[in-house]
Image (cartoon, rainbow, N blue to C red):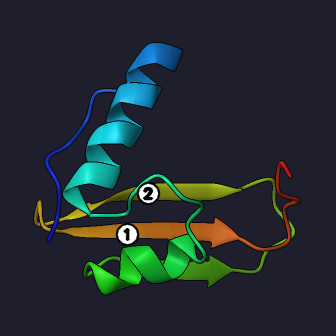
Amino acid sequence: PPSPGFSVNNPDSVEKAVEKLRKNWSLGERPIPSLIQAIEDRCGIVAKWSDDSRFDAVSGRINKQHFIIVYNRNVPTDC
């Protein structure tokens, strides 16, 4: 089930949003084996984009219900 939106404006609000999301999605505190699978299991959509542009990713919601994330797999990750 989708969770209510969270305002994320600073590092403290990120931590609070993560705690709420983990609780709402019953993810516990252990590492998440597949974030993409966790999103898709909750009616989210994750799409890969392959492009040589500087576009890295965008996310949003459809009809206030479904999450959608589109990311460019040609852009290196932060890890």
Is there any visible trace of residue 10 in the rendered image?
no
Where in the figure is residue 24, as x and y percent of width and height?
Answer: 20, 55
Residue in the foreground of this view, choosing between 14 and 28: 28
Query: Which label's residue is closer to the chain start, 1 or 2?
Result: 2
Residue in the foreground of this view, choosing between 41 and 49: 41
Secondary structure at numbered mark 1: strand
Mark 1 is surrounded, within 10 Å at the Cα level, by few (under 14), some (14 to 19) or many (20 or more) other residues, namely some
Residue 5 vs 37, above or below: the answer is above
Please, what is the three-letter code of the amino acid marked with disc 2?
Answer: Ser
Which residue sits at x=17%, y=64%?
Answer: 2
Please, what is the three-letter code of the amino acid marked with disc 1?
Answer: Ile
Secondary structure at numbered mark 2: strand
Residue 75 relative to residue 28: left or right: right
Where in the figure is residue 16, as x and y percent of width and height?
Answer: 35, 28
Circles 1 and 2: CB distance less than 8 Å?
yes
Residue 27 vs 50, above or below: the answer is above
Which residue sits at x=86%, y=52%?
Answer: 79
- In the picture of the structure, the residue carrying the numbered disc 2 is 59
Where in the figure is residue 12, as x and y percent of width and height?
Answer: 45, 15
Residue 35 relative to residue 61: left or right: right
Q: Which mark is residue 68?
A: 1
